[in-house]
Amino acid sequence: MEMEEISVTPEEMQIRNLGTCRIDSPVKNQTGIRFIHDGEQVLYDDLVSREANKGIAIMGQVSLERAGPREKIYFDPAKVRVGIVTCGGLCPGLNAVIRSTVLGLWHVYGVRHIYGFKYGYEGFVARYGHDVVDLNPDVVDGWEDLGGTKLGSSRGHQDPEEIVDCLERMSISQLFVVGGDGTIRGAIKIVEEVQRRGLHTTVIGIPKTIDNDILFIDESFGFQTAAGAAVQALDCAHVESKGAFNGVGLVKLMGRYSGFIACTAALAMSDVNFVLIPEVPFCLEGPGGFLPALKRRLERRRHAVVVVAEGAGQTLMNASGEIDASGNAQLQDIGVLLRDRIVDYLKKSGIRSTVKYIDPSYLIRSVPPNSHDSIYCLQLGHDAVHAAMAGKTAMIVGRWHGLNVHIPMSVTAKGRKQVDPGRPLWRSVLETTGQAQWFCDQD
Amino acid sequence: MEMEEISVTPEEMQIRNLGTCRIDSPVKNQTGIRFIHDGEQVLYDDLVSREANKGIAIMGQVSLERAGPREKIYFDPAKVRVGIVTCGGLCPGLNAVIRSTVLGLWHVYGVRHIYGFKYGYEGFVARYGHDVVDLNPDVVDGWEDLGGTKLGSSRGHQDPEEIVDCLERMSISQLFVVGGDGTIRGAIKIVEEVQRRGLHTTVIGIPKTIDNDILFIDESFGFQTAAGAAVQALDCAHVESKGAFNGVGLVKLMGRYSGFIACTAALAMSDVNFVLIPEVPFCLEGPGGFLPALKRRLERRRHAVVVVAEGAGQTLMNASGEIDASGNAQLQDIGVLLRDRIVDYLKKSGIRSTVKYIDPSYLIRSVPPNSHDSIYCLQLGHDAVHAAMAGKTAMIVGRWHGLNVHIPMSVTAKGRKQVDPGRPLWRSVLETTGQAQWFCDQD
Amino acid sequence: MEMEEISVTPEEMQIRNLGTCRIDSPVKNQTGIRFIHDGEQVLYDDLVSREANKGIAIMGQVSLERAGPREKIYFDPAKVRVGIVTCGGLCPGLNAVIRSTVLGLWHVYGVRHIYGFKYGYEGFVARYGHDVVDLNPDVVDGWEDLGGTKLGSSRGHQDPEEIVDCLERMSISQLFVVGGDGTIRGAIKIVEEVQRRGLHTTVIGIPKTIDNDILFIDESFGFQTAAGAAVQALDCAHVESKGAFNGVGLVKLMGRYSGFIACTAALAMSDVNFVLIPEVPFCLEGPGGFLPALKRRLERRRHAVVVVAEGAGQTLMNASGEIDASGNAQLQDIGVLLRDRIVDYLKKSGIRSTVKYIDPSYLIRSVPPNSHDSIYCLQLGHDAVHAAMAGKTAMIVGRWHGLNVHIPMSVTAKGRKQVDPGRPLWRSVLETTGQAQWFCDQD
Amino acid sequence: MEMEEISVTPEEMQIRNLGTCRIDSPVKNQTGIRFIHDGEQVLYDDLVSREANKGIAIMGQVSLERAGPREKIYFDPAKVRVGIVTCGGLCPGLNAVIRSTVLGLWHVYGVRHIYGFKYGYEGFVARYGHDVVDLNPDVVDGWEDLGGTKLGSSRGHQDPEEIVDCLERMSISQLFVVGGDGTIRGAIKIVEEVQRRGLHTTVIGIPKTIDNDILFIDESFGFQTAAGAAVQALDCAHVESKGAFNGVGLVKLMGRYSGFIACTAALAMSDVNFVLIPEVPFCLEGPGGFLPALKRRLERRRHAVVVVAEGAGQTLMNASGEIDASGNAQLQDIGVLLRDRIVDYLKKSGIRSTVKYIDPSYLIRSVPPNSHDSIYCLQLGHDAVHAAMAGKTAMIVGRWHGLNVHIPMSVTAKGRKQVDPGRPLWRSVLETTGQAQWFCDQD
């Protein structure tokens, strides 16, 4: 698990509440459930420095509020009306999250008015004309095994005023938002609009990112499934690379700002020779560059597998002037660029080769969750419900050090989790691929 | 199974022999094996027309020589030296075919000199400098579960004289060639050169095509595996299409001249709405065209899945002048063209939509064979060995009506198997998708 | 494909019709569909003997009526009421067959009254109190990917009079029965009772058997899927056997009378050393027996994998008096017996060993169909519908030589398809395992 | 993650070292690697109690030494001779652990003498006559994808003196032991014998348990893979249960003392109705017992899925006198007992039902590791090597709160990790199944 060095104060980590919880939780009726108190927290940093024969002291540390059922809740389950929406790109487990949220509301708290909004934030805006789906245990039956989202999704923001208009019209007091960082930023605006109007509506986020780049979260749901699917693409690339003389299998994987999926998939199979990620800039040419290293590998072993994260090498592209400066730098596709540069370089170097380029993106993100992610989604949905019922708002649920926790939306929006080149994940990648730590123009 | 109406005479179907078989097969020592005689044949056409209360009569029919061990063989196993080569694109089962050929030679006949030539026909040509691999049961152990080809492959022809030079130098008297139609045409030239020199070298083909387009063969090895892998891509396309408002999942599958993989994969899952194949020309616009039909589907159901074989719509592209006439018509990519035309058409029609284009080709052809194809590869390799040992040459092994048979190379080179729009496969596609039989510019 | 030498006359192969077909098929309205005539038939035996320079002649041959849509039909789709029932043990593809039958009736012919009877033949008998399920395309949506049967099943017969009472009460004129040989025998009795009452009710069977032992059928639906699942169990047995010194992995597979699944699974992976099937009797002890052969294998390689079909070795068990003669011979479990005998024999022989016994039956038969079987089920269901609409009765649909055909129930009830020890399937097993053709007490 | 309340002092958590590390690590030559210092530790308990507006203070806490490369090492890589052994039952990832240990030794430290001992501790004892396997990167190539252990395994102890004799004879100074709690107890005895002789031999354990019951470890390698495989068996049980009227699918899963695999697999699919584990005693009969609850479930839904861990209900069996007290209590099979009791009870209650019993054990433990476990095994092997090279001994490597750590063997031997009925895992099981917290004879 990589941990960021970000500056967050314990105060910033506090979860906002809509008000005092005065209602007894219906969970109480079941035996054997241990309630969680807000004071139970998980240390953000559990790495300590222990000197021989001395104790350890930690003061003023940041910790995260633990998720789970509270003894007293804020909302009256009989009167609560709930909305659920999924936004942004697909990710394994979306339907499982919807389902477990519905089951938690219905079975644990007895909520009976649950609405699915269709096609992301569009679903709240009248002019799109999307209908609303009544959700209950029968409707969501079997969704845990389905890829994609049965509610549909869309990208992009909608006017928070229109969204809150819709929530008011429908008397919705709990909104569950499943989406990525853009979606969470949208949710923050909804929270602000809710506050401005003095409404008692909670907004709870369940963070979704196939890139696994959310701060304060061990691993986002669907990530393991996606990494496993990516391994299949790498296997194919390896087979293709060995099927031709000087065969190069080049695979572009997701990861706009973080190379987690590229690193993880590369570690999970043993035949990747080069991993290029956004966090580690690289040069293509020059004695220490990537292309000469690839050439040497081919001369030695006659095939190579290269994995590149979609966000890798962006500075390179700008710096080298390889793209026009007219603002469309973001449209540059590192996979295609790399393929072309490899073909050119090897040709110029007099190396006959066959380069196979594989871009499996949709095939990775639309598969159903594996059993690990199924359970994770189940528990995220339940914990989101517990948080909402307790009147917490402006927060997301996630897992930290193996325990589910609450994180303020404002804190997750502070940055992105990235692969740290000095830590174990990247170290394992270097050990496994045998690639150089850096590809630079100097040797 | 689709059957072509080609004109082949019984004489053309006869298998050439290098000479009289005088050596007792070592298979004889094993009990319980029934030998096959050359006269045992499988009818090409087993469809008969039976009138009530009458018999049936068939005269002058074409039939195919059955594969299997012969009682007398031509070659002395102790002295035989064998070459194996894989050519062309990857296909599930290549390694399994190599392995079963080696095991059949080694265990059944006691052959001890088996060489794998690397990187296709290049492997015979001195100037490429490829080494030769000694093959034996230990070396090929476990290959049945590997995708790709451990021998490597290459495309394109090499000079038959240089190839036969190599065979002569290495005293190779049995050559097993695993490859597609181009490879078989190359093999025919090797046979001719062998004859010209008066050599007693047999050349046996094991036909490989992921397109399943070989005449006189029920189904080529690896086809079922590839179709199964294609289904996964279609599942993803379906999930993506439902994940967005008016989502369109467009998948390009293999099939340069024949739509078997597109039709088969589409039938194996139930959510494909349009299948476009090379055998059925189609128009894009006009009242009866594909694009208006797609638009109607979206208006009705808000998502659609489209499968297009890579060779579909070629005439359309030429006829419409959409590509420059400068000879590079073959470079046109129907998948990309279709994606662009769909996006344009829907935009012009005022339909907001999201089109996801998936091109999974390498991910389909490089997977390991499923259990059905594993067995098929096992039996093809063994039967190729039986044929070679009996001195047969210029032939391929294949399966017809469920029985393995011998087919002259000259006959398979006569054409290609294609989907017949009047027969059950296409009928099932129409029934399942509900699409129109033809998309034409008139309604 | 193994072919039985059974005596069937062309007359016996004729399909019975309820009456003359006078109604135009609604299929007619769709373009491009080629109708099938009853005279189009597939030769049962397409193996011919061709002498050099002579033609071939076939007279008086048995052939099978081809399946598919007829131009004229017997039933009026607007008035037809249909029943579907699944009986006996589970098999991959049951739900897919139900679904394709419903879709064929609904979409192709416009039938609107389709009832699913629950829990096999029990579903027709009042005293069980099972409800009836209305079937339509919405209800069966997604069933193609589900293992098992959504209608439930049961074993055993019910009184044909009660069944036909129920059909009469509900005015059902087409009954589709999905089941094994016992179920088909039950269907024959229903047909007889229908005739006795002079009803115009057709009964069409879709034969289900995981043992693949139905006469006149290349391969029954679900068989490939089941064989693929069995391979996974064999892989585990192989891993277990290598994980211990003198490890023996013993797997019992389905196959009461026919060893198809055992042979097929054994061929699909390369590490099975012994295959024991009902068709090939074997001795355990004595110089040529199985146990000494297993011992020799262990001494040579230190591990072994054994596959036994559940019906294998029955005569052995009786002959040796190992079971009491009081009629419960059918309860003897060859897997457990073999395990105990192996353990005893190796112990007595002073061989330390570890025997792992695996009985995966339910794990094989309840999985969803693979893509090959999905398509096969789709086409079987459609062809069953075409046959019923044309007024054919007392028949099953199946595939012969790759084409779907009609087979009279009375003919399939004549016997069972079995592995022929003289033909290619068993030959391949012997070649692959290297086991002796026979294990007998003499060497 | 469940955490035990065990009493361990910080002193007990200290890792023993063979001596001072004076040799520069060869890892030093690679750029970008951050060394780990022994003082870097992970807090055992990172749950804190935070009062509003106050800080947190932790004193005298237990923490775990972090794994990873040390700057100075104890052994001279050029002279080190290494032994690796796998013991006990199979578990997914054994071969991957062997491989990564070999690769870490060979590539990172340049060790060239690595020996695999065969068939567990037997491999060290002369009278068994097992050979030793030379291990190097070529030999272990591809092992990461193989189930089982290529070195073979065995159960049971061997005389530590004979084992250390063998280590001395072969001059082995690093021994890597992959095995479960019995194996670790054996390793502790080896360590003691090594000390007694004053040898400088390190013994490092890599803990293996499919039951996931090792103290101080988040999750043992192979556990996720095994849980995923168990889900397939539960899916089959669900399909079977719905395929019959009042169908009951009963699955026995691993778990002698801990129900992790049963709970995890049950959560990963949504159709389990009852989970019985060793940690939660239960009654069969009486108003609050399991059997009446099962009966009520059948009456309501007509099918049920029951999962039982192999160690569940042991006290019940003793208490009820169902087994003789003659010491063979451990032979009692709860799966078979439960099946028989269910059948009897339902029969007596007048409920027609079909009970399908599935015992998939070998099919779960012998599969290859999934991508998550592949990476975990890779890192465990590397970290075991780092620890050994630094002269640490009598310890195991594991993961705590997402970071790899060192744990003294003596501490892990203190007890077992178990499912805590008051914590989130069991809470999720109750929420998902809807079963009662306890089945007791009183209501």
Image: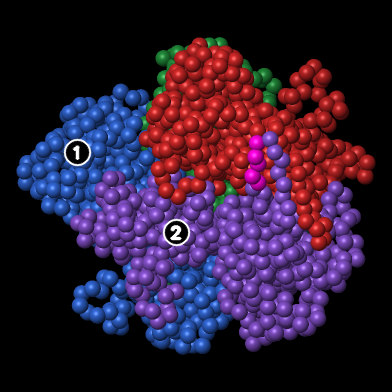
Chain colours: A green, B red, C purple, D blue
Which is the main secondary structure of the residues drawn in magenta?
A: loop
Residue D156 circle label: none
The boundaries of the magenta stretch are: C48-52
Placement of the C terminus of chain D among the 4 image quadrants:
bottom left
Residue kind at label 1, given as amino acid type:
Gln
Residue B98: image location, x then y, percent: 49, 34
Farthest-out residue, left: D197
Residue kind at label 2, given as amino acid type:
Val
Which sits in the foreground, A405 or B174?
B174
At 44% from the left edge and 67% from the top edge, which residue is drawn?
A: D358
**Residue B44 appears in which quarter of the rendering?**
top right
Are there few (<14), some (14-19), or many (20+) residues within 10 Å of tag 1?
Answer: many
Q: Does the magenta stretch include residue B336?
A: no
**Residue C102 appears in which quarter of the rendering?**
bottom right
Alpha-carbon span between mark 1 and mark 2: 53 Å
Farthest-out residue, right: B442
Question: Which secondary structure lies at badge 1?
Answer: strand
Mark 1 sits on what residue? D174
Mark 2 sits on what residue? C280
**Mark 1 on the same chain as mark 2:** no
Q: Tell me the subunit letter for badge 2.
A: C
For the question of whether residue C202 can be seen, the reply is yes
Residue C210: image location, x then y, percent: 55, 62
**Residue C413 appears in which quarter of the rendering?**
bottom right
At 36% from the left edge and 75% from the top edge, which residue is drawn?
A: C323
At 86% from the left edge and 42% from the top edge, which residue is drawn?
A: B439
Residue A285: image location, x then y, percent: 51, 15
Placement of the N terminus of chain D among the 4 image quadrants:
bottom left
Asked whether, in this view, residue A356 is left or right of residue C62, the answer is: left
Q: Does the magenta stretch include residue C51?
A: yes
Q: Tell me the subunit letter for badge 1.
A: D
In the picture shown, does residue A443 fall above or below A35?
A: above
